Image: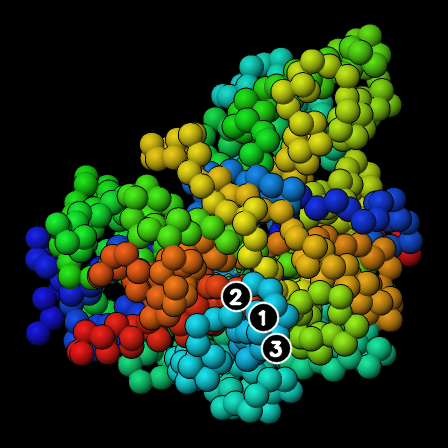
Amino acid sequence: MDKDTSAAVPRRDGSATAGLRDHRYPAGTFAGLIGTPFVTAPTRAALTARLAKPAVTAPRFLDAGEFALLGAVCDRLLDQDGERRIDVPGAIDARLASGETDGWRYDELPDDGSAMKRGLAGFDETARAMAGRGFLELPLDDRDRVIEAVQGGHPAGRAWAALPAKRFFEDLLAAATEAYYAHPLAQEEIGYVGYADARGWQQIELGQREAREPEPVGAAL
Amino acid sequence: MSRIPYSPSEEVDAVVVGTGAGGSPLLARLAAAGLSVVALEAGRVLDPVRDFARDEEAQGFLFWNDERLSAGDDPVAFGRNNSGTGVGGSTLHYTAYTVRAQPADLRLKTDFGVAEDWPFDYEALAPYYDEVEATIGVSGPSPYPWGPARTPYPLKPLPLNGAAQLMQRGCEALGIRTSPAANAALSGSYATDGTHFRPACHNCGFCQAGCATGAKGSADVTWLPLAVAAGAEIRPECYVTGFERDGTGRITAVVYRTPRGDERQRCRAVFLCAGAIETPRLLLLNGLANGSGQVGRNFMAHTGIQVWGQFDDFVRPFKGIPGGLISEDTHRPADADFAGGYLLQSIGVMPVTYASQVARGRKLWGPQLRAHMRGYNNTAGINILGDCLPYGHNYMELSDELDARGLPKPRVHFTMGENERRMTEHADRLMQRIWEAAGARDIWSFPRNAHIIGTARMGADADGSVVDPDGKAHDVPNLYISDNSTWPSALGANPALTIMALSLRTADRFLANRGA
Ligand SMILES: Cc1cc2nc3c(=O)[nH]c(=O)nc-3n(C[C@H](O)[C@H](O)[C@H](O)COP(=O)(O)OP(=O)(O)OC[C@H]3O[C@@H](n4cnc5c(N)ncnc54)[C@H](O)[C@@H]3O)c2cc1C
Ligand code: SF4
């Protein structure tokens, strides 16, 4: 597991999720564990700060329109709505504002900030070309069709002439996914308590569960 | 006797640039031989207990995040995928998988007529492998099922986690031999002469984001304390940019940036150990050691396709040493239609890393992504570590774009060749069968290329290589290179152990030449 990626083409399509385990942990799992001696001080500090961070309302890198558009796209990518969203667009804007990179980018893409601005403009153009209105004015089903067109690599719109849509989409999806699953509540949802490892793990074999790991509540099989 | 800290105006015997796998062992060796040595390291000193959170995002500071441009048909991901920084370099976040190369790995040209042979054979490395394994504390099985007879591992194998047990199950069904893998993580508390006792690994599985206990054999808890005890100085936050030379071409000083401003350290010899991108980048920026035109050429990345599956059993893939189980039955597969071969490794995974791969590899989003991730606790992987041939079309160069430090960003071209494609397909078929036999559902493959190798090739011929078999630059009398850049071929084995072994050999060759 040294690392992930090269720009791999998936060999199989990702539709076969039915019938798999669903192991979310009960709400409150994180809150119950974070203060215990099972969590080291630097871990507690990092996770508590992430949880407490208020949602960004005034973006620092994107303008207000771009930020709203990014939020709407991320909501579809991560199937989020309602009040208790994990603030994915805020995390992305903060990283762009800081100018920090993750150490590489596809040579075909411009720098992260320009790619984001062009790509967001592209989503809007594609929306207008496909449905006659901007992305934010579309019903959810149509938003998904626009996203699928971008993912497919040949969306309508001039912005995409200077921005390879497939690569941009992959980067955007990876950034959004990473920001989401770094959040303690998203980790609770997938039944992860690996942060509570100050005393290590003794039950590491197949099917074994440590006393501090709760029974999952998601029962689907 | 010790005069540390050394003054920059004092001429020290050697400056070592970079404190990762290639720089640290030789720093310890040179200091033990009584030389005055200063290591210049771009990264910070880190205190694992105080600084390391058990959280993937918070540990981002471990990685080399200066932007690199990835080109070619199979662009290589850098940053957390490949390159670290800090006192200890990429060993801070390596997963400690420390398998040896096999003798045949060093003679691809003889055996298959492709790539290059190494300028020495396995026997030249074997005693250094023994020494590295004893110094960093490698846990592994004795006897070891593959390769030539060897000294027993200093520690017994680590316990197997769920992913390792599942791979065992699948391989058993198919008649493939497996064994607990060799890992530089302690199965019991351990010390060698001159090092502190380190505790046994407690199975947290966080190796890739930094080991907070000291159980992992990273350089910061092994070679570097040895080096400091022997009188070496390690200067963190020193980013090397250039070299001063005299009329004969010898390097007389190394120039570097610090938070205090620019400095220069006078020296009699230089060991460049900045990794397989920053080393050739420094050489190209300074027009150094490139009489052969080979600097930056022959970039390689191991074939590393992963196959993931979800199981009815709970795996909880974050627990235990991530690479628990190995098979080297595929080192030279009987039905291969490619040169070289690969090893198989079971893999556990952290949630953000896995989610990111699901995004990049499968492009799942919306409800499908969320549903798939709810099966995280039932996920296990196998991957390969396969050889990669050097090609003219794979290289690194300086681009026109400047980074935050005002230096040209490196651009790295990588496109798999026919050999890598065939090996990847062979491995993909086999791993899918293993997972089916183990009872996996929703099996999916993630082709990838791992590790950064080549770019300052070692060889006897000064026209075709950058350094000689001792690691000394052909063109500069007092410049040595010791890191993943000198390898003539990629080897079918994870690199860190061999980089460390070669580092000790380079130091010994230097000391022998110096005495001569
Ligand atoms: C997540 C991950 C897991 C891995 N797992 C394994 C594994 O299980 N087994 C294995 O064998 N390998 C593994 N590797 C690979 C292994 O870590 C590297 O191959 C190895 O550390 C490379 O050694 P190096 O000496 O070439 O470079 P590095 O270890 O990267 O050291 C280079 C050092 O030079 C410093 N530097 C660079 N430029 C400058 C400059 N201009 N001035 C001063 N200092 C500079 C850097 O900060 C760094 O400290 C893994 C890598 C990653 C990313
Ligand atoms: S699994 Fe062991 S070696 Fe790895 S980080 Fe945890 S304690 Fe360290």
Label whose residue precedes the other's in the sequence (2 or 1):
1
Find out if the beta carbon at label 1 lies less than 8 Å from the nearest ligand 1 atom. Answer: no
Q: Is residue B45 left or right of residue B305?
A: left
Within-10-Å neighbours for mark 1: few <14, some 14–19, many 20+: many
Residue A68 x, y percent position in the rendering: 65, 18
Element marked by disc 3: loop
- Image quadrant assignment for residue B407: top left
Task: Determine contact: label 2, label 1, CB under 8 Å.
Answer: yes
Residue matched to label 3:
B181
Question: Between residues B364 and B432, which one lies in front from this camera angle?
Answer: B432
Question: Which quadrant of the rendered structure holds the C terminus of chain B?
Answer: bottom left
Q: Is residue A139 left or right of residue A78?
A: right
Q: Is residue B175 left or right of residue A63?
A: right
Within-10-Å neighbours for mark 3: few <14, some 14–19, many 20+: many
Residue at left offset 51%, top offset 86%: B153
Q: In the figure, B285 relative to B484: above or below? A: above
Amino acid type assigned to the residue bearing label 3 in the image: Ala
Element marked by disc 2: loop
Label whose residue precedes the other's in the sequence (3 or 1):
1
